[in-house]
Amino acid sequence: MSATAEKAELDREFTELYRLHLRDVYSYSYYRVGNHHDAEDLTEQTFLQAYRHFARALAESNGRPLRPWLIRIAHNLAANYHRDRSRRPQTNLEDAGVISAPHETEDLVEGREELTAVLRGVAGLPDDRREALIMRFAIGMDNREIARALGRSEGATKVLIHRAIRQLEAQLETEKEVGDE
Amino acid sequence: MSEVERMLRGALVPVEPSMALSERLERRLSELTDAAVGELAEFDPSALRDPRRWARLVAAGIVAGTAGGALVLVRARQKQRRREAQGLRALQRGMREVSADMRHRLRR
């Protein structure tokens, strides 16, 4: 196959990856940065970076799905984003860990307190636990995919998610008790 | 599924990217694809002097043209779907804006 044809085949495969996972990358980015504007920037940067390194990633994937690789790129870019923001003196640090959800009006009214408490709880978790929960619940990744995205073993990832859920549960329980008093 | 997992599933819902993002991204990716294909085509000028390779070049050009246009096809398909969903999306977007505004007010 000529170099041009190989490139064309690569582009076709990348197009498929983009089509399948645009929403995943966007959702992950959104829950990492908490606003649509920066989530769009992160998503764009993720795909442009992915395009540049796609041939190598494909060759090294041995046929495994590339979604964890894509999310790992978004994860690294989000980490850079938060690092840059924390260095800027004009940044409001209180906003850095805030997650806002794009729910519709009636959801907001009906389950507003529960929703707010869960999102606040997720935002307050340690970084690795928060990211694992976003990958699991917002994107629907399984333990194996999350492990690959975070560069951990499957066992360690299972423990990480279990502890994240337990910590969140304890936080919500404490908030409820305080609220009841 | 535990209660907290149910709550997490309800809170961390997938988020649809905007049409503007899809279009901007697809345009940029198409530009990159075209540039890369163009560079490859220019990379081997000796091929043009060898008639035995013309057939291969034409075939490669057709494949490249087809795949290079794959993003354009995706865009066209998405536009079609968007046209169908435009009314609903406009409504959803409006509701999202209202909910964002409400959230903002509630935080104050």
Image: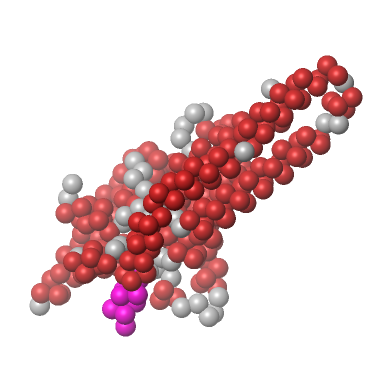
Q: Residue at x 33, y 71 (%)?
A: B98
In the visual, does A15 lie left or right of A111? Answer: right
| One can see residue A79 in this view | no
Q: Residue at x 39, y 44 (%)?
A: A146
Residue sitting nearer the eye, A168 or B3: B3
| Location of residue B96 in the rendering, given as x and y in whole percent from the top left corner | 35, 66
In the visual, does A155 lie left or right of A78? Answer: left
| One can see residue B77 in this view | yes
| Location of residue B10 in the rendering, given as x and y in whole percent from the top left corner | 25, 56
Segment tinted magenta in the rendering: B100-108
Task: Report the colour scheme.
Answer: secondary structure
Q: Residue at x 54, y 79 (%)?
A: A89
| Location of residue A156 in the rendering, given as x and y in whole percent from the top left corner | 35, 44
What is the quadrant of residue A147 in the picture? top left
Is A109 magenta? The answer is: no
Q: Does residue B84 sit above or below A16 in this rendering?
A: below
